[in-house]
Amino acid sequence: MMLSGWGRYPRADCRVLAPRGEAGLRAVLAQETSLIARGNGRSYGDPALNPRATLTLRQTDRLLGFDPATGMLEAEAGVLLPDIIETFLPRGWFVPVTPGTKFVTLGGMIAADVHGKNHHCAGSFGDHVESLELMLADGRLLRCSPTENRELFDATRGGMGLTGVIRSVRIRMLKVESAWIRQETLKTRNLAQTMDGFEASRGWTYSVAWIDCLAVGKKLGRALLYRGEHARPEELATDKRAQPFAVPPRRPKTVPFDFPGFALNRWSVTAFNALYYAMGRSGTAIVDYDSYFYPLDAMQDWNRIYGRGGFVQYQCVLPKAASREGLVDMLGRVARAGNGSFLSVLKLLGPGRGMLSFPLEGYTLALDFPATPQTFALLRELDAIVAAHGGRVYLAKDARTDAAALRKGYDGLDAFEAARREADPFRKFSSLQSERLGL
């Protein structure tokens, strides 16, 4: 069937397999010479695409056990994040790290080593994984953790499925007192204020900024910075205190058709950004967890806004010392190109771990663009800025980076390749992305 990532670019005609159980998976591994595992297809580009064999793992979706004394959850890798939240949030437990969409699987969260709005204080998802079961190319099932088969564990978190198939996971959940977030909004006038706002928010658990990527001059880098904490019952309105985990269900809207290519242009994006910024108000509010962590999930199929040609998300991270200069260069280049992104997000990251894990201490910027020749020309220029400042791009969002950029950006690549050779000497686990990057 034709498959793609969330960006709908590129598309590939893939032979899809759905093995059942451990024995079924082992049989598939014995028969196939090239394959890749796929969760819910929410990586943006081509890391979960292999035309020869793509393994869907959504059928491995059982919750296997939970210890309410410690918050330790064991589940199969195909479990979706909303199933975890809907099961355990009413009991007072939330995931310790979450990406900006909840429509992801546990296995995919590890393969991408996802980070959230709290990376500066909580690290990435892999930092909260107690252990995982990994089936190797030869059918062996290994338990991997920070203390057992550690090199393979470190290669698997962020390894984009290239070390094996994750079968099950044990993670440490986070104890919370409500399903609500105390959100404070800061409206900044330029990039210096935005970055100063992040630094002043280090004591907050969560922080993220929408940034106007088409603002220029003294307004360059202006943003709405949202910081948050899990609300305590006494912070809630009187009518919510009796049931602090009861949240009214959202009624998601749907984008019913592919937008025409001309819908997103310099003028429409500029108008949207100006309106969105103008509507932003500084202040504090109590919002539900869905609105704070997953605002885009309220719009089903929002990727259709970019038209049939799809889109690419460009997410990079710049080291702390080079972040301000690098962001000025990048935002200035995007504004001059006029190829603006109305989904532009800035976050502060802490130190990273894992051989191919994306985070490093500094600032990460994510930009969405239609998949056009003009976009790819712009992104090559952004690549050069990122490389010059010692940064790197996020493989879970990538659809077009080359091998040279990968090698320059990821200093753990040699260690990853050594661990992968040990686990999969014939490179059975392969994707369109890994082939493009020479992995």
Image: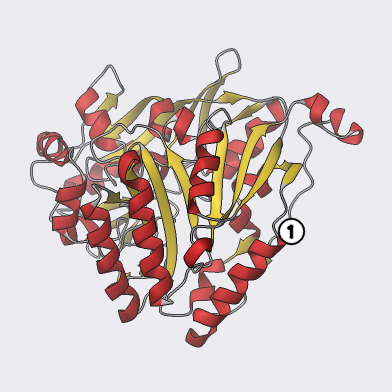
Q: Relative to 344, is 149 on the left or the right? A: left
**Which class describes the residues within 10 Å of circle 1: few (<14), some (14-19), or many (20+)?**
few
Q: Which amino acid does label 1 sit on?
A: Arg
Residue at mark 1? 251
Q: Position of residue 368 (x, y in %)?
A: 44, 65
Helix or strand or loop: what does disc 1 sit on? Answer: loop
Decide: is 138 above or below 404.
Answer: above
Find residue 52 and report its horizontal and vertical position in percent: 22, 63
Is 88 placed left or right of 107 in the picture?
right
Which residue corresponds to the image point at 48% horizontal and 28% vertical from the top-left? 121
Compare residues 250 and 77 and report the one nearer the observer.
Answer: 250
**Viewer-side residue, 191 vs 169:** 191
Residue displayed at 48% across by 68% down? 341
Q: Foreground: 123 or 67?
A: 123
Q: Position of residue 40 (x, y in %)?
A: 45, 53
Q: Which residue is drawn at 33% across and 80% down?
A: 374
Report the residue at 26% width, 18% height from top.
Answer: 148
Whether residue 239 is situated above or below residue 10 in the rendered picture? above
372 to 433, vertically: above or below = below
Residue 300 visible in the picture: yes
Question: Quarter holding the N terminus?
Answer: bottom left
Q: In this view, does 327 lie to the left or right of 296?
A: left
185 versus 332 height, above or below = above
Where's residue 95, x and y in %?
55, 33
